[in-house]
Amino acid sequence: MPARNRPYEQFGDYILLKKLESDGLGDLFRAVRIEKGAAGAVVALRRLSGGHKEALAASAHAAGQLVPSLSGSTFAKDQQIGVVGGTAYVAHDYASGRSLRYIVDRARGNGAPPNPIPLDQAIVIAERVALSLATLSDLRAGGDRLVHGGLIPQFIWITEDGEIRVGGQCLAAGLAASLHDEKVAADIGRYFSPETQHSGQASKSTDVYSLGAVLFLLVTGHEPPDATRTSAFMHAIRAGKTMAGEPLPDDIRSIIEKSLNIDPAARFASPADMRNALSALSASGKYTATSFNLAFYLSSLLKKEMEAEVAERQREAALNIAPYLEVPEAHAVAAPVAAPATAAFAAPPAAGKKSKTPVAIAATTVLAAAGVGAWFFLGSKQQTAGAPAVVAASTIPVAAPVHPPVVAPEPIVATPEPAPGAEATTATASPATDTESAEALRKKMFEEAVKKRLQQEMLKLQAEYTRELQQQQSRNAPVLSTAAPAVQSTRAQEERPSAAQLDQQREVSRADDLAATQQAAAAPPSTVSSMPAPVVPTATTASPAVPPPAPAAPAVREGDIVSMESLDRAPALVREPRPGYPPIAARQRIEATVMASILVSETGDVLDVKILKGEPRFGFNDAAIRAFRGARYSPAMKDGKRVRTWVPQMIHFKP
């Protein structure tokens, strides 16, 4: 039983806050990392306590040397793989998400009404995972190309914002050795190709097989068939049905059959080839999935979990970590290896003699603990009450949220026309009890958090669209922003590919392919970046001469186009849009959100509407455009002049 001053279990440098999943391979926790004597980042930590612990530890030692360099948008963020007390673990940024394993289990119902994953969302998840595998295969370590080798649903993380990230790379040897454990084999064995189960070797072909198994799980909701039963294997694939009980579409079935072929030579040659096949499905127009729509599906699927998490995170933020610093747990450090790529598939080394902690280090730790305790004691007096629910006043230093420079307009909610008699029924409703009031408060807090994320996403899209307009109209258009030219130049320099250049290049190529087939232009969230800060020139070592005066900004004239962040007064709605709910969508109770950018004239009229992100099906985009064109705003002001500006706005169609 945990002590009162240590209510949570400690695992090396981590405090395990809540267990989220459990299977034969181990447990998944929401945890907080102890960093420099204080609470650091909240992480998702999977403790690999099952299977072949020695083999998993050996693989984790080698993988721990590789994963810090995997920083692309499809890799688990801030991933760490290591060993604590002989137990391997995989940790990465939490980002308020869940593993694919958990999401599929919830989609199947498990005691609740099922909420199947839409086929288009299943394709976009599989395509992003394929992109991660393809990017990994283009990297080298020790002269060999890298492969994942252990792709299972537990290592695919999906955030509330619809980001898909893959972790657990290069653990193939330990996972393959763990398949001899019946519990582990029952949970993850079907995601490994027959040759991996027999030899433990991983390759691009085995990654293709694992990805095909994941795709089968996504579209059917069932575990992939057992490849060891060759007689019924392909029959089970051909007889598969979607989560909704319908036959698998032929185009999806053909990809699954080719990736799950028992003969490695008959499969896709590489994850990149399989990704091209999945991209062709998305580009065909039959499946119009986006990570934005995936985020809405997850918010509906995991609504109860996310509402409960708000209160849980508030309690966890009040944790005093000082007692956890008093007796730090000894934990193994990833040992350096000469060739990480080959060591990941080597046999586990013999256990060595444990090292003892020197007395000097223990004394230093006690002094550090005393200092941290004093810091917490003094810091607690400076805390303020009434902080937001997620970032509550506590002894854990929590980074302040970064708010965008412009306050986003409130979303407009469109609902179908009420049925006859609905108003009367609502009027006679009984007063809410205390329990209902508390439940309503939790729901409101959750909805506010979702709305805030949507507004931040809308502002990012608006900033990206403003930059596009600046590039298109720089030669012959009026001024878009009063920012100095140096800012635009710096921004162009800073918008370079991240460390995972291959990942980003594939994303750009993917966006170009889809541009001709999509009706609404949408910027991929993984490539949207915040507006960089202006560059401040540094002083030179020359004589302190008075610098020349900066060139005066061009005078703003009435009717000029000025970016919203530069305005003295932003437009305000005078006549709100009145969106009509598309009839087909209303009958089927389909929900959607449309984000748009509206060009407001110097008189407050709407001159143009540009869809930033929306839903082209069922007429949602058209309904939003008609509604926005009927709106009216107060004029935007800059330097006492009435000017034009692009205003981000959002309509949420909710049945």
Image (tube, rainbow, N blue to C red):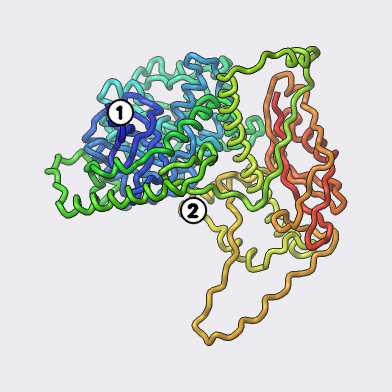
In the depicted structure, whether residue 496 falls above or below residue 278? below
- Asked if residue 120 lies left or right of residue 604, the reply is left
What mark, if any, has residue 536 been given in the picture?
A: none
Marks 2 and 1, Cα distance to the nearest angstrom? 33 Å
In the depicted structure, whether residue 157 falls above or below residue 555? above
In the depicted structure, whether residue 485 falls above or below residue 23? below
How dense is the environment of label 2, judged by Cα within 10 Å: few (below 14), some, or many (20 and up)?
some
Give coordinates of residue 477: x percent, y percent. Answer: 79, 61
- Asked if residue 28 lies left or right of residue 520, the reply is left
Q: Which one is closest to the eye, mark 2 or mark 1?
A: 2
Give coordinates of residue 510: x percent, y percent. Answer: 58, 44
What residue is at 86 percent from the left and 47 percent from the top? 605
Q: Nearer the viewer, residue 489 or 410?
A: 410
Disc 1 marks a residue whose amino acid type is Gln
The quadrant of the rendering that contains the C terminus is: top right
Residue 587 is at least partly visible in this image: yes
Helix, strand or loop for disc 2: helix
In the depicted structure, whether residue 328 falls above or below residue 196? below
Q: Nearer the viewer, residue 475 or 329?
A: 329
Helix, strand or loop for disc 1: helix
Disc 2 marks a residue whose amino acid type is Gln
**Residue, disc 2:** 501
**Residue, disc 1:** 197
Residue 145 is at least partly visible in this image: no
How dense is the environment of label 1, judged by Cα within 10 Å: few (below 14), some, or many (20 and up)?
many
Give coordinates of residue 474: x percent, y percent. Answer: 74, 63
What residue is at 16 percent from the left and 48 percent from the top? 357
